[in-house]
Image (cartoon, rainbow, N blue to C red):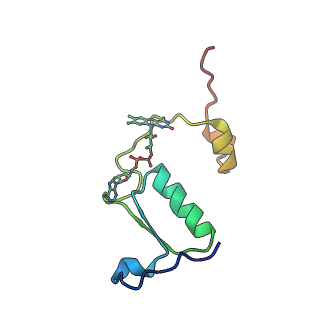
Amino acid sequence: MSAIPRDPSREGPLGSYDVVVAGGGPAGLAAAKATADRGLSVLLAEKHQAFGIPTRTSGGSFIADLQRLGIPATCTIPSRTPA
Ligand SMILES: Cc1cc2nc3c(=O)[nH]c(=O)nc-3n(C[C@H](O)[C@H](O)[C@H](O)COP(=O)(O)OP(=O)(O)OC[C@H]3O[C@@H](n4cnc5c(N)ncnc54)[C@H](O)[C@@H]3O)c2cc1C
């Protein structure tokens, strides 16, 4: 992937990034990682003081996704919803 052409009419600190992501929730974090993995520079802006605050999870996730992220099985408690 090549860098996105910069608009010379846009000046300021944001103009020095290929991509600016607003919001450090799961979607924003995934978008920022995917961008950085492709060699583009990215600014991830979160309006709160830290990512993940306030917490927006009860702890439920899909096991396949956790495995893909390298989360050890010792960190999860498998559960199935009754059919
Ligand atoms: C009580 C509760 C429990 C939940 N439990 C689970 C669970 O167990 N498992 C699960 O998979 N999902 C759970 N969810 C759902 C999960 O939280 C959402 O699906 C997920 O957070 C959506 O991610 P998102 O990145 O789209 O949005 P968000 O998580 O809402 O992230 C958006 C981010 O953008 C930031 N933002 C907004 N406006 C701006 C701005 N102008 N500038 C900069 N930053 C900005 C916000 O502060 C926020 O951090 C739960 C939700 C709730 C409310």
Nearer-the-camera pick, 68 or 32? 32
- Which residue is pictured at 54% across the width and 75% down the height? 4
Question: Residue 35 occupies which quadrant of the picture?
Answer: bottom right
In the picture shown, does residue 78 fall above or below 43?
A: above
Q: Nearer the viewer, residue 79 or 37?
A: 37
Q: Residue 39's spot in the image, x, y percent?
A: 61, 74
Q: Quarter of the image holding residue 58?
A: top left
14 horizontally vs 76: left or right: left
In terms of image quarters, where does ligand 1 lie? Answer: top left
Q: How many marks?
A: 0
64 shown above or below 18 = above
**Residue at the (64%, 43%) spot, across then down:** 65
Q: Position of residue 52 (x, y in %)?
A: 41, 51
Location of residue 56 in the rendering, given as x and y in whole percent from the top left corner: 40, 41
- The x and y percentages for residue 60 are 53, 34
Above-or-below relation of 9 to 30:
below
Q: Quadrant of the C terminus?
A: top right
Q: Residue 10 versus residue 22: which sits nearer the camera?
A: 10
Between residue 8 and residue 81, name the one nearer to us: 8
Quadrant placement of the N terminus: bottom right
